[in-house]
Image (cartoon, rainbow, N blue to C red):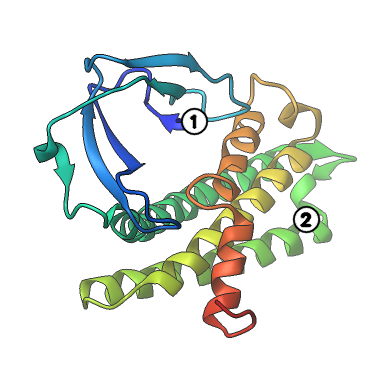
């Protein structure tokens, strides 16, 4: 198993694996596997571009056996259970991105007010003002979308569409903010001693992890009838 968050330090793993010969998404189950089980090992930790505070590991399972009572939910329904969990994960990612973008925007504006160039603050440049105002408007829309998604979830509705849109758009908004933060800080944004460099590296993950942008687009295309099943 690759790309396992916290895999190098976990006491147990929530494992999605095939438990029957049925093809496709059928015949998969979710199983709790203690990491002290015979045959389990951490092959290596991965040296990532960003999110370095969270380890990501490659795990090996060599003839690992656990009791049947370690199955989570229903045998053979693991894939469906995992897909339900993904909606929560994607909404959480969107909530995080809204907060991160808001903080980055405020910090960038504060820097541009302070940084002088040619006798005036950088923020006196109208093109910077408009670009940041446009980004702030997208941030507002993203925040209100997240509120609507939370309300739908609490009402017991299917939030697949909410979560898919939120994951796609919030990740792209964060990438845009990260790029502007580095650009508007100039050379100071390109060195590791200042926050924009790490923000740039860390936010890049969100268009990949938890479902890549392309997966989100395919899901929306299917939901909109643009492509068939």
- Residue 7 coordinates in the image, percent (x, y): 37, 24
- Residue 184 coordinates in the image, percent (x, y): 76, 42
Q: In the image, which disc is placed on residue 2?
A: 1
Direction from residue 154 to residue 104 in the image, left or right: right
Q: In the image, which disc is placed on residue 152?
A: none
Identify the image quadrant of the N terminus.
top left
- Residue 67 coordinates in the image, percent (x, y): 12, 32
Q: What residue sits 72% from the left and 45% below the top?
A: 179
Q: What residue sits 32% from the left and 53% below the top?
A: 27
Q: In the image, which disc is placed on residue 128?
A: 2
Residue furthest to the front:
21
**Residue 144, can we see it?**
no
Q: Estimate how packed mark 1 is, as few (under 14), some (14 to 19) or many (20 or more) residues with alpha carbons within 10 Å.
A: some
Identify the image quadrant of the C terminus.
bottom right
User: What secondary structure is marked by label 1?
Assistant: loop
Q: Of callouts 2 and 1, which one flags the residue occurring earlier in the amino acid sequence?
A: 1
Direction from residue 160 to residue 180 in the image, left or right: right
Residue 72 drawn above or below residue 12? below
């Amino acid at each position: 198993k690759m790309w396992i968050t916290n895999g190098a330090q976990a006491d147990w793993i929530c494992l999605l694996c095939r438990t029957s010969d049925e093809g496709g998404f059928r015949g998969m189950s979710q199983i709790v596997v203690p990491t002290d089980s015979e045959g389990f090992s951490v092959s290596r930790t991965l040296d990532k571009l960003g999110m370095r505070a969270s380890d990501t590991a490659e795990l090996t399972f060599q003839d690992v056996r656990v009791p049947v009572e370690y199955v989570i939910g229903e045998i053979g329904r693991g894939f469906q259970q995992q897909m339900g969990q993904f909606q929560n994960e994607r909404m959480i990612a969107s909530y995080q991105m809204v907060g991160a973008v808001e903080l980055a925007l405020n910090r960038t504006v504060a820097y541009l007010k302070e940084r002088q160039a040619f006798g005036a603050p950088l923020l006196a440049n109208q093109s910077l003002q408009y670009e940041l105002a446009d980004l702030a408007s997208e941030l507002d829309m993203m925040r209100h979308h997240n509120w609507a998604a939370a309300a739908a979830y609490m009402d017991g509705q299917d939030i697949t569409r909410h979560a898919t849109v939120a994951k796609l758009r919030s990740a792209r908004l964060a990438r845009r903010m990260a790029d502007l933060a580095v650009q508007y800080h100039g050379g100071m944004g390109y060195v590791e001693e200042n926050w924009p460099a790490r923000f740039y590296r860390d936010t890049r993950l969100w268009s990949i992890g938890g479902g890549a942008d392309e997966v989100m687009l395919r899901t929306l295309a299917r939901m909109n009838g643009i492509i068939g099943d």
